[in-house]
Image (cartoon, rainbow, N blue to C red):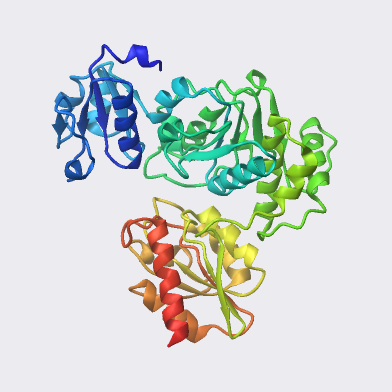
């Protein structure tokens, strides 16, 4: 959406989290008049000293329907009664990425997926910078997309959640990918198909599409409308065009020693290589840079080894699929710490992996009893009340050769500020318990 389409309209910024505040700053820079609405007690700290900005502390259909345009923060569902009423009344409901799409004047590479998107965005940003092109990671990782416009980037690597994609229609990335689709956020979507379709919105208007050959839900639909390449770590060799596309990437990274474990990171490496190719960078420098990436905090992050037991922080593992990948990547018997807000996920799909790899499951958080019922019989299960208790119990039960893994498969907001806070508390508890 062009800023010229907004200037003469009544605009409401709904939600004043990190993204909402970036929208506020952007609209102030562009001299657009707007109101703000947030039901939390956030107005005193947002740093707005413009007497023309009116503040609203309650969401209502009457309020929302009185505006021409609502810039909706991704944390607020379009199904919220006030938002739904505005949509029904013909109000244009957009997100920060819709404003970003008009304002950005450098190439954008866009990444989404249920798992791995932050890793791929950070990894790709590192590789592009190593090759001498200034790249900045933004969106759902790093700084908000609208704030990133103030930087000196030659390329913006944009992580997008399904929530952001719901309200985006004009983004034109030079490359876009859906890494994978697994059950997540089913408390917000009708089913996994609606969730997948929202993820696939990233392909609209993209010059180059990259999909996961092993996950049909990532494929652009309808396929004939898109020119798409595929990545894959599968060993099949069907000779198809899609498999040929994946094969040359596998050949290029086969001899690269990656610093991050697991087949899922081999897949991530293929994506990084494929996306970097659209920038016409030196392939030898890309491959060299590929092996230097050491991973992100809270994503299967190695914490410490003591008495032959390795401790890992995968607090970012907020859904079942991410948890499963982290368990398998350990390559040793696992004591798993999990639980929190399950978001409607089906944990029975984790049973086979639990039986093969997990010797003890320690469950905490809001939905611990529901998860325990889903996983009954797949491993020994103990219910705990706190993360510190989970770490203490894991320390008492672990023997040399085990891996203790925090990979909650759940959201964190029942007990923590966010997944980072949960991961930090885990590391602190590990250090305290091991030092005792």
- Quadrant housing residue 77: top left
Residue 51 x/y as whole percent: 14, 28
Residue 349 x/y as whole percent: 54, 56
Q: Is residue 113 above or below residue 424?
A: above
Q: Is residue 429 above or below residue 123?
A: below
- Residue 371 visible in this rendered orientation of the protein: no
Q: Is residue 50 above or below residue 393?
A: above
The residue shown at (78%, 34%) is 245
Residue 171 x/y as whole percent: 50, 23
Residue 59 x/y as whole percent: 18, 34
The residue shown at (65%, 21%) is 226
The C terminus is located in which quarter?
bottom left
Front residue of 18 and 151: 151
The residue shown at (33%, 21%) is 30
The residue shown at (30%, 42%) is 17
Front residue of 39 and 284: 284
Total label count?
0
Q: Is residue 291 above or below residue 7?
A: below
The N terminus is located in which quarter?
top left
- Residue 203 visible in this rendered orientation of the protein: yes
Q: Is residue 237 left or right of residue 300?
A: right
Front residue of 323 and 133: 133
Front residue of 87 and 382: 87
Q: Is residue 179 left or right of residue 273?
A: left
């Amino acid at each position: 959406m062009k800023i010229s389409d907004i200037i003469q309209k009544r605009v409401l910024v709904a939600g004043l989290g990190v993204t909402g505040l970036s929208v506020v700053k952007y609209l102030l820079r562009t001299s657009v008049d707007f109101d703000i609405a947030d039901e939390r007690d956030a107005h005193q700290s947002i740093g707005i000293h413009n007497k023309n900005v009116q503040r609203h502390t309650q969401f209502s259909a009457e309020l929302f329907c009185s505006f021409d345009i609502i810039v909706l923060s991704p944390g607020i569902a379009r199904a919220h009664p006030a938002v739904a009423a505005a949509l029904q009344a013909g109000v244009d409901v957009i997100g920060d990425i819709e404003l970003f799409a008009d304002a950005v004047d450098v190439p954008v590479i866009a990444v989404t997926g249920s798992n791995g998107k932050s890793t791929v965005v950070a990894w790709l940003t590192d590789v592009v910078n190593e090759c001498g092109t200034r790249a900045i990671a933004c969106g759902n990782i790093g700084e908000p997309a609208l704030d990133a416009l103030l930087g000196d980037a030659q390329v913006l690597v944009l992580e997008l959640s399904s929530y952001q994609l719901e309200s985006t229609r004009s983004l034109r990335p030079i490359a876009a990918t859906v890494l994978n689709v697994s059950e997540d956020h089913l408390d917000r979507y009708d089913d996994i198909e609606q969730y997948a379709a929202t993820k696939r919105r990233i392909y609209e208007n993209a010059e180059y599409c990259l999909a996961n050959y092993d996950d049909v839900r990532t494929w652009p639909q309808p396929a004939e409308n898109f020119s798409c390449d595929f990545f894959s770590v599968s060993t099949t060799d069907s000779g198809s065009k899609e498999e040929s596309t994946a094969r040359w990437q596998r050949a290029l990274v086969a001899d690269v020693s990656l610093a991050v474990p697991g087949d899922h990171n081999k897949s991530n490496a293929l994506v990084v290589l494929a996306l970097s190719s659209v920038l016409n960078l030196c392939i030898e420098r890309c491959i060299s840079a590929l092996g230097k990436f050491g991973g992100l905090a809270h994503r299967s992050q190695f914490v410490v080894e003591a008495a032959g037991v390795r401790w890992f922080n995968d607090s970012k593992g907020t859904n079942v699929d991410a948890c499963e990948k982290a368990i398998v990547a350990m390559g040793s018997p696992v004591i798993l710490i999990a639980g929190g807000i399950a978001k409607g996920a089906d944990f029975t799909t984790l049973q086979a992996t639990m039986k093969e790899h997990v010797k003890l499951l320690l469950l905490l958080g809001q939905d611990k009893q529901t998860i325990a019922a889903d996983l009954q019989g797949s491993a020994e299960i103990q219910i705990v009340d706190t993360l510190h208790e989970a770490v203490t119990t894991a320390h008492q039960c672990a023997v040399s050769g085990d891996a203790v893994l925090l990979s909650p498969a759940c959201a964190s907001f029942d007990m923590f500020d966010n997944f980072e806070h949960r991961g930090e508390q885990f590391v602190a508890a590990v250090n305290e318990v091991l030092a005792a």
